[in-house]
Amino acid sequence: MHQDETDRRVLSRAMKHLAPYVLPRWRMFAAALAALLAGAGFELLKPWPLKFVFDWLLTDRVALPAWFNPPAGDPRSWLVAAVCLAILTLAALSGLAAYFREYHLKRLGEEVAFDLRRAVFAHLQNLSLAFHDARRSGDVLSRISGDAASVRDLASYSMLEIATAIVTIVGMLGVMIAMDWHLAIIGLVTVPVLAPVVFHFRKRIEQAAKKLRKHEIEVSSVAQETMSSLRLVKAMGRERHQHQQFSLAGSKSFQAGLEAAKLEARYVWVVDIVGALGTCAVVWWGVHRVLAGRLSPGDLIVFVAYVRGLYAPMRDMAKQSIKISKGMIGLARVLEVLETAPAVTDLPHARTAPPLRGQIEFRDVSFAYRPDRPVLERVSFRIEPGQTVALVGYSGAGKSTILSLLPRLYDPAAGEIRIDGEDARNFRLESLRQQMSFVLQDSILLQTSILENILYGRSDASPDDVEAAAEAAGIAQFIDRLPDGFQTMVGPRGIMLSGGERQRVAIARAMVRGAPILLLDEPTTGLDVETERLVMDALERLMRGKTTIVISHKLNLIERADQVLVVDDGRVVESGSPAELRAAGGLFARLHELATHNYGVIEDQPRHAIA
């Protein structure tokens, strides 16, 4: 598809998405437009004081104007003062118009970019995990920051320069034609020569700008991923490797930037040469017309100023080409996010979920992250309120997927998930998820205080609720020993706390939430014996009275379950109490036998490794 057509389609889509942000601010845009027109008018008037200098002061061929009657002294001195005052006044008015023009238009750009960032951020949160799983985190972050900023530059800085240039060029051409259309044609004779040059360089600069933006995103992605995984990088001694990756991406960005800068410099040089030729033509022909008495010296000064003014915006447009190209790329990437429909949404008839009892039923549920690789096939089971159910099976069997489907992080490809006898899709997402709590293997803590991390479970929890949750989670005494108590900062991802402390803060967060459904994914993996005992005690208090689904390879947690579901190759192949399944001699019995020889741990290995 031709680039111009692509840009037109992007702009058409942009008008649809950006109109709600721009239209309410039409007064700001109108003020910027009025200032722009006023500024263009002042720019047109700037050469005219010099015309009076040459026509009324530096020649005796023209008499002083009859209306000019100074009070005393040499009238020419008064006229010089008046001309200087006019020059200063025009400069002041032009600067004032430029101030209001840039302030209003750039404020418009900043406000639109701010609202756009919020919209993109909110939409990214609403998009399913499948969208985020397929993208690098650095790429997603660049759409919120860099791409939104590019749209701001496109909407304000670049468009401002182009609009100013167009209005100025049109005004100058109109005045030139009114003054002397013959000389105006001479001044424009080089434009046909310049047109193909502009077209050629514009295309090349656009291509260079796209390449530059692509490599800038790569640099951002490498840097973000390295910083977020810095502990792994250091632990594996891969600093040099990551530095090489960053240097490689940075080198490509540097080369692309250098190529764009060279093209811009060449373009400016060509425009300057062509502009100088046009100026020479005007001077050559204009002097002959002045000598012939058909043009005054002041008119020639105005013409020369206008001709130079015609080519200056063309030259300056080259400086905007990269910004415009970046803006179009950023705009397309922002629109790609906004136009991506969430895979999991509230149905039109969805209602707020009532207080749930916690009955859960899977009816012939099938699911696949990719169409060619099914993860679950016709999975069916039922959990009664208050029951604890353990999911057991080989690595990759589909256990974590079952947990992800319950809060509708994904929707099944077929079948139904029913909660309290009703399809979960009949409930609004937020109200459904508010009645579920999670404790994961890798407890995710925010980079804030212990208090804020616990309150993340329920923001309106009272201080007594928080203290009770901390006590039940077994961290109250630990927190009391800290200098800042609940206000102690936990660092990025809770790095200032030990693994067991992080896990128990996560349990306190689930405690304060008080949800009737509890989902546990390997909550005790990687803990030492003493810490595991503390976490298990906290988990037992957390699980009381709740419908709990737990994924675990620890027999001491599996044996506490009322029911065990053995998942194998995307299907539930066995179900029953731990004792019943041990006696049945099936897959669970084999896994249990292996675990007894492995310190009570069912090894998380692919099926073929231990089958």
Image: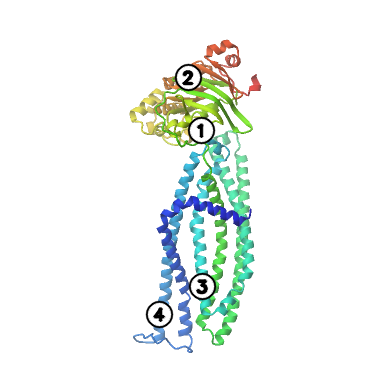
432 shown above or below 303? above
Spatial separation of the CA atoms under disc 3 and disc 1: 61 Å
Mark 4, Cα crowd under 10 Å, few <14 / some 14-19 / many 20+, is few
**Residue 172 has which mark?**
3
Mark 3, Cα crowd under 10 Å, few <14 / some 14-19 / many 20+, is many
Q: Amino acid at mark 4?
A: Ala
Q: Amino acid at mark 3?
A: Met
> Which is more N-terminal, label 1 or label 3?
3
260 shown above or below 434? below
**Residue 28 has which mark?**
none
Foreground mark, 4 or 2, reads: 2
Label 3–label 2 contact, CB within 8 A: no
> Which is more N-terminal, label 3 or label 4?
4
Can you identify the residue that label 1 sits on? 409
> Which is more N-terminal, label 2 or label 4?
4
Label 3–label 1 contact, CB within 8 A: no
Q: Position of residue 471 (x, y in %)?
A: 38, 24
Tell which of 343 and 569 is nearer to you: 343
Q: Which residue is found at the position 53% from the left and 53% from the top?
A: 12
Q: Position of residue 422 (x, y in %)?
A: 46, 26
- Helix, strand or loop status at disc 4: helix
Residue 526 can be seen, yes or no: no
> Which is more N-terminal, label 4 or label 1?
4
Label 1–label 4 contact, CB within 8 A: no
- Helix, strand or loop status at disc 2: strand
Q: Where the C terminus falls, by quadrant?
A: top right
Q: Amino acid at mark 2?
A: Thr
Q: Which residue is found at the position 40% from the left and 73% from the top?
A: 89
Foreground mark, 4 or 3, reads: 3
Can you identify the residue that label 4 sits on? 81
**Residue 388 has which mark?**
2
